[in-house]
Amino acid sequence: MASLAFWLFYLVRRRGEISENIYNFINGEFVPPEDGRFADTLNPSTAEALCKYPLSGMRDLEKAVEAASSAFKLWSKVSKVTKERKTRRQWWM
């Protein structure tokens, strides 16, 4: 998980949106973990703390699964061509 958080930090930094914490992305918004626990993300070459990532629990997971299930019901009705266009547009933003 730490390496994923490092790459998320890298991508956010590239866009100029540096944040002290990385949050869970659930149902289209960034939310802190239910129990408020975070861990440090370290730069592997300097061991400097870059930011913090959430130590998510079961309640966070349940929320994410519920949101993903709802989104899947809508997304499964969208045509393949529209999905491809939306995905490509989102990737290059």
Image (cartoon, helix red, strand yellow):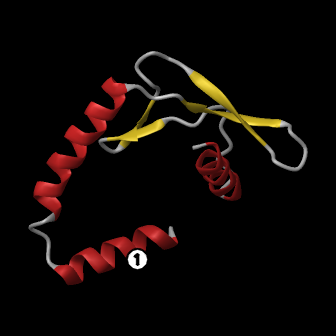
Q: Please give left or right for residue 6 compared with residue 31 in the image.
A: right
Which amino acid type corresponds to the residue marked 1 in the rendered image? Arg
Q: Quadrant of residue 89?
A: bottom left
User: What residue is shown at x 85% (from left), y 37% (from top)?
Assistant: 48
Residue at the (47%, 70%) spot, across then down: 91
Which residue is more in the foreground, 87 or 7? 7
The quadrant of the rendering that contains the N terminus is top right
Q: Mark 1 points at which residue?
A: 88
Residue 72: percent from left, percent from top: 17, 56
Q: Where is residue 78 in the image (x, y as percent from the top left)?
A: 14, 71
Q: Give the residue drawn at x 32%, y 79%.
A: 85
Residue at 9% over, 67% down:
77
Q: How crowded is mark 1: few (under 14 residues within 10 Å), some or many (20 or more)?
A: few
From the viewer's perspective, tell me whether residue 4 is left or right of residue 90: right
- What is the residue that sits farthest to the right in this orientation? 46
Q: In this view, does 24 lie to the left or right of 22?
A: left
| Left or right position of 92 against 89 | right
- Quarter of the figure with residue 29: top left
In the rendered view, would you say 16 is above or below 86? above
Q: Camera-side residue: 92 or 77?
A: 77
Image location of residue 27, percent across then percent down: 29, 42
Up the image or down, 44 lies above or below 56; here it is: below
Residue 80 location in percent, x, y?
A: 19, 80
> Helix or strand or loop: what does disc 1 sit on?
helix
